[in-house]
């Protein structure tokens, strides 16, 4: 591949050509019945992280029903529903995905398959995708509209040097992500070895915190913008890897919320119902936030009874033992559910005496993890800037 330097501030696009999107990529529309397939990997939109080129999680055919879309290794799975979430990832396996996605495959005569994912993640493409989405509550892209959109693409013979640049950035990002994964693994191992053990004391979650029910509402109750007189409603999609994200939240008038339903710093949001069993029971702690926040009807809140219990809950919710305990008590067929009583009666055998040094070490690992996450976030901003300078 070419290795000469590229002046992104003065990138010559005089020989670039305009193509319709269906000339740039194919829309793969093969159908799959999850109840009648040998494929083992299911990708829902919940498995694709916003702004990430790679898909790090997946489900199984048992998680879903209804006709889905087949994809092949190296295809791009792009969330056509709520495109503003910018979910588009490279498939690492053969499998099938949600019908709320598009399966896209680069046309190598127009764009190199290694450059195509970066193009999809450019503001040029993503902003156009948002602009052509239709619908209010759940805006969705139609292929018939997307395929007619036109984009400026560099000549195929000059794309290699752009790939070298962007891949170098991506490789560094992946190295940072690998280090983060090792830190997380060390954290989980320490929890399982030093905080949870079959010989320790039985501790019910009801001893550690008070469980609160989520807020029920109707679509007509929702309002468009947050103000001091309103409340942010968190749902399952807002609980991700032990932290809360505020992508695609709902907003209600504050008069519809009981005071005890409002979350405070250090409270936890818990997913209580979802089509994917891997999401049910997932919990995330609310960090400092001065806004009014509550959880929706298919979630619950956990308010720790003390600061010590808050730290203990933080690590228990992150443990494999907690996830296994949740999976054993799930009910439902197509939708997996937890009842409030399930969480209240749930127990683990936990080191509760002389555990200060263990908790301190776990907190140190959490701090290290958060620092690396922040570093990755900053690097993502840099990479996004590079992509947008190219396209």
Image (cartoon, rainbow, N blue to C red):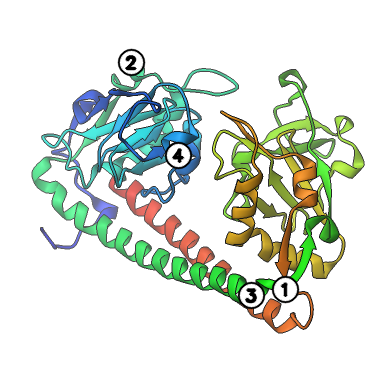
Q: Nearer the viewer, mark 3 or mark 4?
A: 3
Q: What quarter of the picture does the C terminus occupy?
A: top left
Q: Nearer the viewer, mark 2 or mark 3?
A: 3
Which numbered disc covers residue 86?
Answer: 4
Q: What quarter of the picture does the N terminus occupy?
A: bottom left
Q: Secondary structure at mark 2?
A: helix
Q: Percent x, y for residue 117?
A: 29, 43
Give how far apart the Cα atoms at labels 3 and 1 are. Answer: 18 Å
Mark 3 or 1 closer to N-term?
1
Image point 28% across, 40% down: which residue? Answer: 94
**Snapshot quadrant of residue 105:** top left
Q: Percent x, y for residue 241?
A: 57, 54
Horizontally, is 326 left or right of 100 in the view? Answer: right
Q: Nearer the viewer, mark 4 or mark 1?
A: 1
Give how far apart the Cα atoms at labels 3 and 4 are. Answer: 33 Å
Closer to us: 351 or 31: 351
Q: Secondary structure at mark 3?
A: helix
Mark 4 or 1 closer to N-term?
4
Mark 3 or 4 closer to N-term?
4
Q: Percent x, y for residue 359?
A: 70, 76
Using the image, determine if residue 213 lies above or below residue 55.
Answer: above
Q: Secondary structure at mark 1?
A: strand
Which numbered disc covers residue 218?
Answer: none
> In this figure, which residue is indicated by the disc labeled 2?
144
Give how far apart the Cα atoms at labels 2 and 4 are. Answer: 20 Å
Q: Residues within 10 Å of mark 1 (few under 14, many from 20)?
A: some
Which numbered disc covers residue 200?
Answer: 1
Q: Residues within 10 Å of mark 4 (few under 14, many from 20)?
A: many
Image point 64% across, 75% down: which residue? Answer: 362
Using the image, determine if residue 221 lies above or below residue 214.
Answer: above
> In this figure, which residue is indicated by the disc labeled 3?
362
Give how far apart the Cα atoms at labels 2 and 3 are. Answer: 51 Å
């Amino acid at each position: 591949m070419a290795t000469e330097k590229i002046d992104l501030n003065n990138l010559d696009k005089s020989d670039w050509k305009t193509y319709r999107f269906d000339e740039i990529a194919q829309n793969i529309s093969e159908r799959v019945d999850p109840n009648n397939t040998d494929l083992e990997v299911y990708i829902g939109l919940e498995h694709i992280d916003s702004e990430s080129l790679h898909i790090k999680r997946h489900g199984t055919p048992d998680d879903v029903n209804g006709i889905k879309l087949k994809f092949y290794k190296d295809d791009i799975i792009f969330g056509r529903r709520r495109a503003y979430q910018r979910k588009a990832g490279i498939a690492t396996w053969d499998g099938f995905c949600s019908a709320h996605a598009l399966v896209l495959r680069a046309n190598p005569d127009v764009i190199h398959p290694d450059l195509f994912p970066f193009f999809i993640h450019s503001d040029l493409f993503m902003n156009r995708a948002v602009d052509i989405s239709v619908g209010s509550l759940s805006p969705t892209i139609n292929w018939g509209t997307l395929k007619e959109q036109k984009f400026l693409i560099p000549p195929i013979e000059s794309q290699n040097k752009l790939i070298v640049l962007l891949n170098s950035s991506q490789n560094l990002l992946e190295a940072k992500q690998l280090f983060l994964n090792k830190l997380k693994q060390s954290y989980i191992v320490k929890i399982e070895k030093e905080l949870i053990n079959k010989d320790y004391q039985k501790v019910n979650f009801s001893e550690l915190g008070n469980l609160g029910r989520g807020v029920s509402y109707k679509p007509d109750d929702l309002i468009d913008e947050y103000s001091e007189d309103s409340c942010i409603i968190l749902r399952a999609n807002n609980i991700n890897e032990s932290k809360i994200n505020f992508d695609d939240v709902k907003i209600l008038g504050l008069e519809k919320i009981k005071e005890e339903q409002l979350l405070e710093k250090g409270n936890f949001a818990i997913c209580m119902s979802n089509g994917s069993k891997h999401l049910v029971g997932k919990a995330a702690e609310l960090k400092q936030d001065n806004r009014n926040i509550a959880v929706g009807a298919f979630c619950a809140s956990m308010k720790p009874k003390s600061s010590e219990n808050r730290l203990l809950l933080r690590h228990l919710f992150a443990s494999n033992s907690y996830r296994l305990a949740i999976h054993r008590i799930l009910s439902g067929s197509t939708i997996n559910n937890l009842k409030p009583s399930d969480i209240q009666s749930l127990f683990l055998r936990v080191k509760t005496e002389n555990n200060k040094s263990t908790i301190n070490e776990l907190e140190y690992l959490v701090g290290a993890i958060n620092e690396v996450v922040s570093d990755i976030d900053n690097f993502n901003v840099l990479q996004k800037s590079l992509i947008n300078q190219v396209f």
